[in-house]
Image (tube, grey):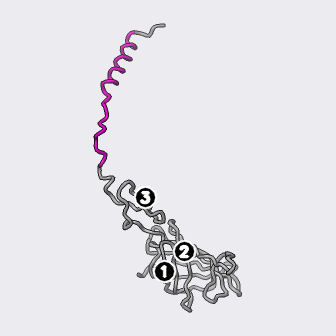
Amino acid sequence: MKAPMNKKYFLYITLLISLISCKKSNENASLDNGLFDRPYCNDPEAVNYNRDFPGIPDSTVCYYPIDVFVGSYMMKDSIFNAEYELDTVLEYTITLKSSNKTNLSVTGFCTGGESLRFTADKYNKAVADSTYLADSTKLPGQLTCSKQDTLTGLLLRNLPDSSLIKIDWLILSDTGLNYHIGTGTKIK
């Protein structure tokens, strides 16, 4: 069966227009539109690793997990007992310092000046470090303050307000469990 004549002409005209409208690419065209001149972070430990790639590697534009935590905070800490009944509300100042790109030390929680250790990740969370015994056995949590109590938990940076951090800690002691749930406001 033959196609009607106007369908043949339509097909030929479409093919002719397609061939005429094709343009040979210019292989010498410059791809440099500023993309290769901008700096980007090339450190895998950084939060912004390879953001803005391609470009020029520049470690000065990197920021790290600890950067959102470092500083001093006025804490309002609500302490709950094992039955999750409010026991005490405390206010105190803590200071968070970095020892490298991911590790933090927290002072001000223990009255004797001892520091707590946390490891930060790129999701605005820092987890209390574990304790290792002399035989390399890993125990959950870390010894805290009295060296007879064990702390596990998190520090979280509040995303909508960068001046706030939250604590969610569990302290196991010889007197029982205590939950510390609180908010800290950055003071410097």
Q: Of tags 3 and 2, which is closer to the observer?
A: 3
Tag 3: residue type? Answer: Asn
Q: Label 1 near label 2: C-beta < 8 Å?
A: yes
What residue sits right under mark 1 in the picture? 96
Q: Which of marks 3 and 2 is nearer the N terminus?
A: 3
Q: Which residue is nearer to you in this view: 21 or 87?
A: 21
The quadrant holding residue 52 is bottom left
What residue sits right under mark 2 in the picture? 155
Task: Determine whether the residue tagged by mark 1 lies in a helix, strand or loop.
Answer: strand
Q: Where is residue 90 in the image (x, y as percent from the top left)?
A: 55, 86
Q: How far apart are marks 2 and 1 (CA)?
A: 11 Å
19 drawn magenta:
yes
The label on residue 168 is: none
Q: Which residue is drawn at 42% across and 61% down?
A: 42
Work out whether 145 lies above or below 131.
below
Q: Which residue is nearer to you in this view: 74 or 8?
A: 8
Q: Residue at x 58, y 81 (%)?
A: 78
What residue sits right under mark 3 in the picture? 50
Determine crowd level at label 2: few under 14, some 14-19, many 20+ residues with C-alpha closer than 10 A: many
Q: Which of marks 1 and 3 is nearer the N terminus?
A: 3
- Image quarter hosting the C terminus: bottom left
The quadrant holding residue 25 is top left
